[in-house]
């Protein structure tokens, strides 16, 4: 009888059975643990695309390299979009700059790519970041096909860090298609194309990590967060979804946060781009108020339900809200029938309205709802934050207060007339432990208005030992808050 040939001690029949069992086991494991194919073909229902090649090939020609020259000294503007954000002044970046560019800031920055942009129409309009072209004496645009153009600024909007520049070309220009950032979902794959550190047409991929991020860069923060690598020089480049459409404009990174980048939602940019193209500037509706979100304590203080309203902290004299009779401590519930739940939402609602447009604003005042009509003006800048006040010593709760004088109000950049200013907070006192700070303005005590120091002292005297005290406080530059104490 012919012997069966053995492999590693097993016959061919046994090997076939083992292979079959292994394959069956792998299929079972894949089914049980839902292991996806690594060669996914689309963005939906799959772990990863098979390739980004077609997306890069389609969109790269419309992504441009922007180089600018500026008169005067100083460090490269390449890094401006990456400062002023959380951890934005990281010394490691400065060290990298020295090593990468040999320490010759001014000489190199005139030769290196400062940013990116993308062509949106056949007329040669290019979207980029404001910080890429701000203050530029000369702007050069380089296409992937080798063509080079001089560009002019059509308009800039520092508030959203957007700019529109234009080139004039004889031949046909490649273009990108704008998508819908509202439809973008957390976890979706995206592609970033740009010129990081002067390295032309670099493609990186990642996912949308979060939406609606506020990073403190401006009044309209509403960023898309992504882990697609974004570095200095990527500024102004597109963030592209798997359908090949632009959903964001890459704008910033957190220097100390590896893999964290931010893009301006394209839906926010569309209206701004249209205004820059037609008018060269952006006109926004202006209400003339300071606002803030209602935290848990404020909602409890005012008897507000969850997800309702935005608190008016300040009304600027002579501005639309003031003329319409809106007052500090009013709570905005809706604008033209659309509910308001965050200060950011209210800012965007008003900014999207036309200058001169009349809007109906529903407010809550002293527990009663009313509607006022406001004719919006053109937005203007709000004054900066407060100066540091000189400290004194002593006082109830370990704090000392003074009358709010005209001079103090001016130093704090506020228009308040009533209230008392905290001028000193004793170390380890009740006030400090509760979070009171010098410069805070006490507006109410247990729902009773505090007009001056006499009102404050009278209110303190009426409260018995061991009883709770709710202080309604205005913190210039931060808004209104409730601080709870016990006498």
Image: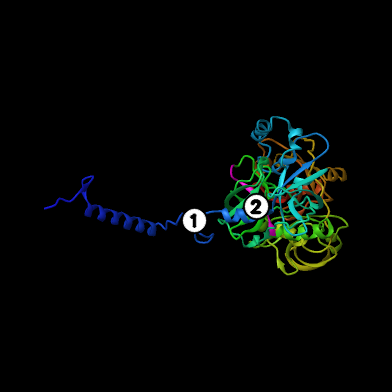
On the image, the x and y values in percent for residue 349 come to: 74, 62
Q: Secondary structure at mark 2?
A: helix
Local crowd at mark 1 within 10 Å, few (<14), some, or many (≥20)? some
On the image, the x and y values in percent for residue 333 come to: 72, 64
Q: Which picture quadrant has residue 307?
A: bottom right
Residue 210 seen in the figure: no
Query: Which of 430/315 is in front?
Result: 315
Magenta region: which residues?
258-266
Q: Which residue is mark 2?
A: 60
Residue 237 seen in the figure: yes
Q: Which picture quadrant has residue 176?
A: bottom right
Q: Secondary structure at mark 1?
A: loop
Image quarter (top left, top right, bottom left or bottom right) of the C terminus: top right
Residue at the left extreme of this rendering: 1
Q: CA distance from mark 1 to mark 2?
A: 24 Å
Q: Which residue is mark 1?
A: 47
């Amino acid at each position: 009888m012919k012997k069966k040939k053995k492999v590693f001690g097993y016959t061919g029949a046994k090997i076939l059975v083992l292979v079959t069992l292994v394959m069956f086991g792998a299929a079972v494991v894949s089914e049980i643990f839902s292991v996806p194919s690594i060669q996914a073909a689309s963005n939906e229902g799959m772990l990863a695309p098979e390739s980004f090649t077609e997306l890069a090939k389609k969109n790269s020609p419309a992504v441009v390299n922007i180089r600018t020259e500026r008169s005067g000294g100083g460090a490269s503007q390449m890094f401006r979009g990456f400062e002023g954000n959380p951890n934005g002044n990281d010394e490691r970046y400065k060290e990298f700059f020295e090593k990468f560019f040999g320490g010759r800031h001014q000489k190199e920055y005139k030769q290196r790519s400062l940013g990116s942009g993308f062509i949106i129409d056949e007329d040669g309009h290019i979207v980029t970041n404001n910080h890429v072209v701000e203050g530029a004496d000369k702007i050069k645009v380089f296409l992937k096909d080798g063509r080079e153009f001089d560009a002019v600024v059509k308009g800039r909007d520092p508030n959203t860090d957007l700019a529109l520049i234009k080139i004039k070309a004889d031949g046909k220009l490649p273009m990108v298609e704008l998508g819908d950032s509202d439809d973008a979902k957390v976890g979706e794959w995206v592609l970033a194309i740009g010129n990081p550190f002067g390295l032309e047409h670099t493609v990186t991929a990642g996912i949308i990590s979060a939406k609606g991020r506020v990073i403190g860069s401006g009044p309209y923060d509403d960023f898309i967060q992504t882990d697609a690598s974004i570095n200095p020089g990527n500024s102004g480049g597109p963030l592209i979804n798997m359908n090949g459409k632009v959903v964001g404009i890459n704008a910033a990174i957190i220097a100390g946060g590896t893999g964290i980048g931010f893009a301006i939602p394209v839906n926010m940019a569309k209206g701004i781009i249209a205004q820059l193209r037609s008018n060269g500037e952006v006109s926004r509706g202006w209400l003339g108020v300071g606002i803030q979100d209602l935290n848990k304590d404020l909602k409890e203080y005012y008897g507000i339900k969850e997800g309702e309203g935005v608190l008016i902290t300040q009304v600027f004299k002579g501005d639309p809200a003031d003329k319409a009779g809106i007052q500090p401590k009013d709570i905005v519930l809706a604008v033209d029938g659309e509910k308001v739940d965050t200060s950011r939402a209210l800012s965007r609602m008003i900014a999207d309205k036309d200058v001169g447009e009349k809007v109906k604003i529903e407010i809550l005042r002293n527990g009663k709802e009313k509607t006022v009509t406001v004719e919006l003006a053109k937005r203007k800048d709000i004054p900066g934050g407060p100066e540091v006040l000189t400290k004194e010593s002593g006082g109830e709760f370990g704090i000392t207060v003074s009358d709010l004088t005209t001079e103090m109000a001016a130093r704090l950049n506020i228009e308040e007339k009533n209230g008392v200013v905290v001028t000193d907070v004793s170390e380890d006192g009740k006030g400090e432990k509760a979070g009171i700070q010098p410069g805070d303005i006490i507006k109410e005590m247990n729902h009773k208005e505090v007009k001056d120091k006499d009102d404050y002292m009278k209110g303190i005297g009426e409260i018995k030992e061991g009883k709770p005290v709710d202080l309604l406080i205005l913190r210039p530059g931060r808004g209104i808050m409730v601080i709870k104490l016990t006498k």
